[in-house]
Amino acid sequence: MKIQQRILLHLFIAIAVYVLILTITIPFALEIVLPKLGIAESEQELFIVLLFGLDTVLMMTWLAWYIGSPILIILKWIAQLAAENFEPFANYEKIFNRKGKRKFRFRLYEEVLTQLETMRLQLMEAKVERGKVDQAKRDWIAGISHDLKTPLTYIKGYTTLLLKREYTWSPSEQREFIEEIDTKGKHMEQLISDLNLAMQIEHSTTIPMYKTTQNIVPLIQQMIADISNDSRAKEHTFSLETMQETYAIELDPELFKRALQNIYMNAVLHNSSAVHIETSLEQREDYLIICIRDNGVGMDKETLQVLFKRYYRGTTTEKHSDGTGLGMAITKSLIEAHRGTIEVESEQGEGTRFTVSLPVTCKNKK
């Protein structure tokens, strides 16, 4: 029963009780009390009016307390929550009787009380989670500052060497310095790009995308080729398995490549020894399933739980990291922006498996 119906029912019962009281008290006063007091019939009318008014005031006072007192308790509870005090309600015992059941008048607002308790628990959990995120942000800021400072130190160092007039560097040495500067510059560019994209995703309900329908197979082939040529992936091997040569997908090429690149680099950077990174494509009904798996070190349950959360880096500031802690969060957002889903399975020592599901643009022929 809804609150409105319950209040109407209780009002109807109160009116019935009020009428019953009047039918008892007025005849009792007319036939017994007033004659015994020696009040003449001509004067009894005034006393009846006074009695009627007294009954009405008492009934209205009781009804206001019956309906209004739970509202005052609820307002105090809301004020407690507004003050970010998520402990159990201070006056909670006023709501229950000795048997632990809600007092009758509080049953009028049963849904409100239940929802307030649920909201209290949710807010308390959110406060704890917010504390964890704030701590992660502080750790992340320390880490990202370190990651930005490191390539900048290299750039400044090599630049200083090149500018020293007392040294004459050979063309090969100069090229080596410039290549290092270029590598560190690209690293900084990638870090800043991740930051910009993450902020854009966080402060916008939609990600600006420029979608075109194209074959995803050569796109992934080119991506694997680029990553396999990366010096950080020189010990790893890659393979691609596909039953078809064409899978038409509507996507933004640059953003989609960024999403998959983060998955591949996650496998590259977190496996120091050689691993095999296998990619398979398979169409299931109206969805293309992209599976990227490796036989590396895998992840523990704690890492899996926070993998797609922002600011989780997976390393401490004392340990080198080539990422911002935003990569996998960005990947998830970009995949979802393409109306897809991403799942991850992993066990320590057993490798990791990412499964991306994307809607196909049209029926692809086998």
Image: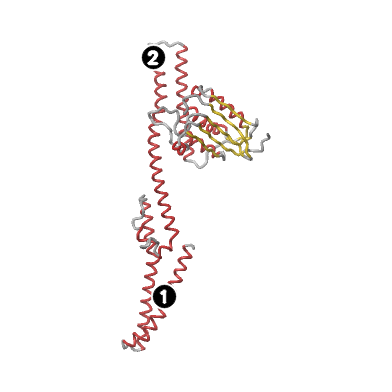
Q: Which residue is mark 1?
A: 18
Q: Residue at x 32, y 87 (%)?
A: 36
Circle 1 packing at 10 Å, graded few (<14), some (14-19), many (20+), is some
162 vs 287, left or right, is: left
Could you tell me the amino acid type at mark 1? Answer: Tyr
Q: Position of residue 98 (x, y in %)?
A: 35, 62
Q: Quadrant of residue 22?
A: bottom left
Q: Earlier in the sequence, mark 2 or mark 1?
A: 1
Which residue occupies the foreground of this view, 214 or 21?
21
- The C terminus - image quarter: top right
Q: Residue at x 40, y 63 (%)?
A: 106
Q: CA distance from mark 2 to mark 1?
A: 102 Å
Q: Quadrant of residue 321?
A: top left
Q: Position of residue 32 (x, y in %)?
A: 35, 86
Furthest residue to the front? Answer: 349
Q: Which residue is mark 2?
A: 164
Q: Judging from the image, what secondary structure is the residue with disc 1 in?
A: helix
Q: Residue 186 has which mark?
A: none
261 vs 215, left or right, is: left
Q: Position of residue 88 (x, y in %)?
A: 36, 53
Colour theme: secondary structure
Could you tell me the amino acid type at mark 2? Answer: Lys
Which residue occupies the foreground of this view, 99 or 363?
99
Which one is closest to the eye, mark 2 or mark 1? 1
